[in-house]
Every structure is written in C-alpha cells, then in structure tokens.
Amino acid sequence: MNTPIVSVLMSVYNAREDELRQSIESILTQTFKEFEFIIINDGSTNNNEQVILSYNDKRIRYIKNETNLKIIKSLNRGLEFCSGKYIARLDADDYSAPKRLEKQVKYMEKHTNVGGLGTFFKKLDTGQIVKPPFKQNDVKLLTRYVVGCISNPSGMIRKSVLTDNNLKYDENCLHAEDFKLWADMSYYSDLAVIPEVLTFIRSHEDGVSKTNAAWQDKIVRVVLLDNIIRDFASDTKYFYSILNKYVRNQVISNEELQNFKGLIEHVILKVAFQISLPYNIIVEPSLMHMLNKLAISGRI
C-alpha cells in the first residue's frame, strides 16, 4: 500500500458490538479512499477483537495492546503508527458521514495554514446538532477557553503540527486530554470547523465522561487556567505557583487567594473581550465553581 493521505485513528476497549461495527463501516465506506485505518484493541475482554478481524480490508492496520493501557497511552501509541499527512480521529461508539474525510481533506488542502479541523456534529442520545463557531480566528481562540469547540471524534489533524512541535496527548490530563491537545495545537497553527454535520456522537451513562465528571472538571479548569496564563499573565511564575498548589490541594494564604482571584478575573475579562464573548460564558462553568470554592474553603 502506498503512503496514505489520511490515517484514521481509533482506540477500542470493550465497545458494544453494534456500535463498533457501525463505527468501522462508516470509515470503510467513505467516498475518500486513500486512507489507512489504525484500530487499536486496548486490551478488550469482550468480542471486540473478533469484530475487528471480521473485516477483510487491507486498509485496516490492527494493533493489539496486551494489557489495557487506557485511552491516552493507547492513542499516543497509535500516533506512532500514523503515516498519513492527516490524522482523523474517531471513537469506537461514534460514526462519520460518508463524505467526512473527503470534505475535510479538501478543506485542509486548500487552507494550508489550518492544522486542525472539526465539524458540526449530532448527539445521538438527544438529537441535538452542535454548531461550534467555524471562523478560523474564532475557533483558534475559543478552543483554548471553551470545551468542545472541536469535538475530538470529528477532528482531523495535520500530522506535521504534532511532529514539528512534539505534541501528543498529555498523560497528566486524563479525561480532558482532547481539550488539552486542541488547545496546545492552537498555539502553533490555525484551527477551523466545517459548518456541516459530518460526525455522529454517542454518550452513555456509564461512559468515561460521566463516570469521571468530577476529575474531568478539575483537569479542564487546570488546562483553562494554563491557557489564560500563557496568553495574558504578566507574572507567569506567580500564576504557575498557585496553579501547582491547586493541583496538589495545598492551602494558600488569604492574601494569595484574594490576589489570585483578582488576577484571574482580570485576565478572563481580557479573554472575553478578545474573543467577543460575554464574561459569564468564559467563567461558567469552568472557573466560577473554582473561584467560589476558593472563597469558601481557602484552598486551591
């Protein structure tokens, strides 16, 4: 097989058979044909291996983790196998519209400044169609401050942005690793969203996002604060010292607390002004909970 234009990357762990089949088949039936399909079985204990191996398609590259490495290590391992110019992500319980790859590749080829590209998507559990902002300047900034501006299962990445800047999924950001990666990418390239529903996403009650919501919320706030510091803080050393205490659940003084709150509120106003969003959009829900918690408990 010649070097493919797109590497589709999927990590699978104990997925439901019908959903896994729908996900795989949505890629194999794409109108764009020049891809490799890297499927990583991350130590599944059900019939996922049999399902994957039942497809006789030379574009599938099957990789088996002997143990469950978890999503971040599994995806980072998968990135090492991706040989395409572009990397398209898809989760094992989601699926893509037939022209997803065709339209994303066409966009990326035309807009060489864009390193990451999402799409509008439909939530299958509610029927809601999510339409993130799609202008490049808006997406680039919003990706740093609004979770889900680019939905990971809809994402296509220009591989050179990762390799040139040593980027991958951050193992310190479990359950918010996609938010972190897209935010990191925004510092090295433009980002965009195709204003069309090309991805269909499921949400399960026993899914990772719901069962680990509290931890995910904390990591999202850490990433968000890190982005604010990178963009707007003049005294980064002070900010990072406080952020480190937050991660470690260490007590800080009342003076530090008040100074920190004031500085955060000041830089958030700068963020809101620059991306033309109301202050409360940026603060809620990612930061206001944290600020209120700080005021009540005196802890970070």
Image (cartoon, rainbow, N blue to C red):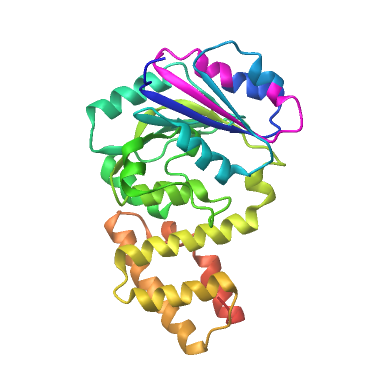
Q: Residue at x 35, y 47 (%)?
A: 185
Q: Which residues are magenta?
A: 24-49
Question: Which percent across, then down, holds residue 11?
Answer: 58, 34
Q: Quarter of the image holding residue 15?
A: top right
34 falls in the magenta region: yes
Is residue 286 visible to the viewer in this orientation of the structure? Answer: no
Q: Nearer the viewer, residue 168 or 104?
A: 168
Q: Whole-percent x and y of residue 172?
A: 53, 57
Asked whether 234 or 134 is in front, the reply is: 234
Quarter of the image with the C terminus is bottom right
Q: Is residue 139 above or below residue 278?
A: above
Find residue 28 and report its horizontal and vertical position in percent.
Answer: 51, 15
Q: Quadrant of residue 6?
A: top left
Compared to residue 222, the image places residue 40 above or below, namely above
Q: Residue furthest right?
A: 46
* Lateral position of residue 4 relative to residue 109, left or right: right
Image quadrant containing the N terminus: top left
- Decide whether residue 72 is among the magenta residues: no
| Residue drawn where x is 33% and y is 64% of the image | 230
